[in-house]
Image (tube, rainbow, N blue to C red):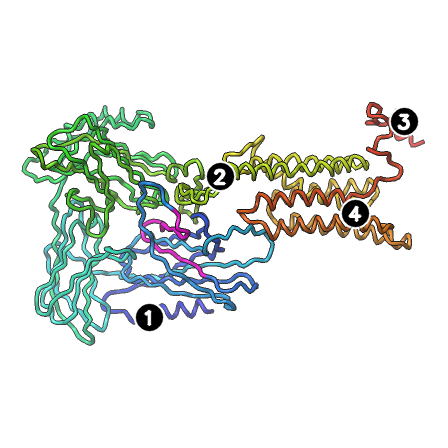
Amino acid sequence: MKHFALCLLLYAIAGCLADDVTYLNAFYSKTSQKLSKYSWFGNVRLHHFRVPEDTVLVRWLLTATRASVMNCGDQNITVHFRAGAPPVINPINTEFPNSTSVTFAQNITINIPSGQSSNVTLFNVTHPKPGDWFLAAHLPKDDGKIEQQGMPSCSYLFQPQMFVRRAADLTVLTDNIPLHKTLTAAKAPALFKVFVPEFTTRLDIFIQNITLQGTSITLGSHTLRPGSVVTANCSWFEPCSASLSTPPWNTWVLVTIETSTVNATMDFDISASVTVGCKPLSVSDINTSAFIRTIGSPRSNSSFDLGNASVSERDLRVNSSEPACMRSPSVLRDEQDVLSLRYVVSSNMNVTSDLPTVLALDLDSSAESGGTFVIELQLNTSALIGGFGSVNACLTPSAPVFNVNDTCATGFAQGFSLSVSKNESSALLRIPFPEAAMWYLSLQTLCNHSVDCTNASGLVSVSASVSACIDDCGPYGECRLLRTNSYLFAACVCKTGWQGWGCTDGSAAQSFSRQMAAALLLTLSNLFFIPPIIVALYRGYHTEAAVYFFTMFFSTFYHACDQPGVTVMCIMDYDTLQFCDFLGSVVSVWVTIVCMARLLDPVKYMLFMGGTLVISMAMQLDRRGLWNLLGPVIFSLVIMVTAWIYRTVKRHHCYPPTWRRWVFFLLPGFVSALIGVCVYIFAQTDSNYYYTHSIWHVMVATSVVFLLPPREKHIPPWGWTHSICGYKLCKNDKEELYSVTGT
């Protein structure tokens, strides 16, 4: 009901903005998701929205809800916004890998006060950039406490909903065709759009007959980052213009005319001028044989045969009268796998000082924006010509830079700079979560002015690719492919205390000695199961002893395989080891408590087998569920207590009958088990896991020694009626005959 009322409010507010333009409203909602504390990017809840073209208003309705009834105190939830790609965030202030360039997204904080169950926050963006928008929400830094599934905890849900107000019939400005329009201050601003074709170098908007003070022209759409729009303030009764150098190609640019004067109307004339002042050198037709050789070449070969075979052809002019301001070599886009893409270009491209060389790198699909964009330059220092100083490069989205030596920025975007020279012949740039757009890499030789600058040039090899993670997360991390609905992205999960976007921040890394100590404690602590095995064998509980040995064996090798660092040893598949370890642990508890009930052998072994089968099924369904342990414990305790009460009533004497059994065996056993359970549930954190979990091993094994019932009177020590060599494995002939005849 609350959300319905808010929706009505949104539509009512939107209706107040109506003017001569036809507006349409839409509402989009995402499913609420449980939030997690942040330790790596996989902890965020990423939501993907698509903002339609000609949207004039986006209003996000952010609902944060406390899902638990516990008194959890105040809680802050951080929400990051970004257009074009998932937001790059760093809530725990870790270091990024070398040569990595990042632009952090804008974020807001939602607070849920103590005693309040929810918080609804509105976040508005006027004239947003159309296309993909991403929201990432998370709780503050993870404190490292290991929470057991099924235990009460403070949990929070986050649900974003998007209200969109879209103009259905925006006026289109055509090149050099003026329009007469009316601006009413009481209504919405006057909105127009103009298409920017490829190779445009400049966009100009002119308005005349300005009769209102505070009039302004705004070009572009908001992306929540600086420089996404250009605004020009106009003077009263004077012509006004707004200019945009190197606007984004093949896109519509929004033009907004507004005034701060209230209750006034202004008739004005508006026109647009699109200057297509730069075209690449024309190239000849494709060399078919070279193209076939390139497509058929091994993927590991980074050279581009097509480019090498036709470099001279690229510089041929089809129409020599056309001015040219750049060279544009061909680029092969090679899609290899999910979030795996490479661009194959000419090796040893000739980069000159007179014209920039521009490579068009097609990343205009959101399918690759969840990876890492990697650009690498390599200069051939043995082939420098003229007054060579260096080769400067600039990587920009949507439009290239034509004078790399002057600036590395376009109309709406700040570019990424690289440079190679004699002293530094290689350069590397990595961009996590690049914006989905057509990217342009502009290269130009910078002349050394101490010598003749005529025909200064150098040979440069360019390597461009998209990979899932930076350097595959290196030796201290693992690259994980993540998904939100149908959108795929990748992130590094680090180990042994390493942190950061590429697991390169070793400020909290564990030393080798600590890793070794953790491995030895977690594995060797399982040797405490040797005393329970010996006691079980001595008292004739051979099945129980086999279960304890199974648990000791698989727990030892599971923890040897589960180590996050270099001290790892896996004797079989990790999932198999984990299943056997979890199964053995619960079955050990099950058979111990059932054994304490002192039931008849057929009933006892039936419960052993039936309980093991049920536990195996539960482990397969939810391996870490708390009830996988509590269920068998409670059920077996009911069986044990029922059996003890039955014996107590039947014998008219407390069972077990002796106080020594209670004081010296049962009480220490229950205390050891209780300590182990408390440590396991309440004390474990990521930092102390290796010794708290070792304490759990020791306490469980110790409790088994105390809790196993005494040996039956008719069973000799070790359960053997004869010597070891005479141990009876089968029935003798007389017993078999009796079982057949029944006499």
| Residue at the farthest left position | 321
Q: Label 1 neighbourhood size at 10 Å, few (<14), some (14-19), many (20+)?
A: few
Q: Which contiguous range is marked in magenta?
A: 76-94
**Is residue 708 rendered magenta in the image?**
no
Q: Label 2 neighbourhood size at 10 Å, few (<14), some (14-19), many (20+)?
A: few
Whole-percent x, y for residue 523 in the image = 61, 37
Whole-percent x, y for residue 705 in the image = 75, 42
Q: Which badge, 1 or 2, is on the more N-terminal residue?
A: 1
Q: Label 4 neighbourhood size at 10 Å, few (<14), some (14-19), many (20+)?
A: some
- In front here: 348 or 691? 691
| Residue at the farthest right position | 743
Name the element at disc 3.
helix
Q: Which badge, 1 or 3, is on the more N-terminal residue?
A: 1
Question: Residue 665 has which mark?
Answer: 4
Amino acid at pointer 4: Phe
Q: Is residue 41 left or right of residue 362?
A: right
Mark nearest the camera among 3 and 4 is 4
- Cα–Cα gap, marks 1 and 4: 74 Å
**Image quarter for residue 224?**
bottom left
Residue 622 seen in the current view = no
- In front here: 140 or 505? 505
Name the element at disc 1.
helix
Q: Is residue 259 left or right of residue 103?
A: left
**Is residue 85 rendered magenta in the image?**
yes
Name the element at disc 4.
helix
Q: Label 3 neighbourhood size at 10 Å, few (<14), some (14-19), many (20+)?
A: few
Q: Which residue is mark 2?
A: 511
Amino acid at pointer 2: Ser
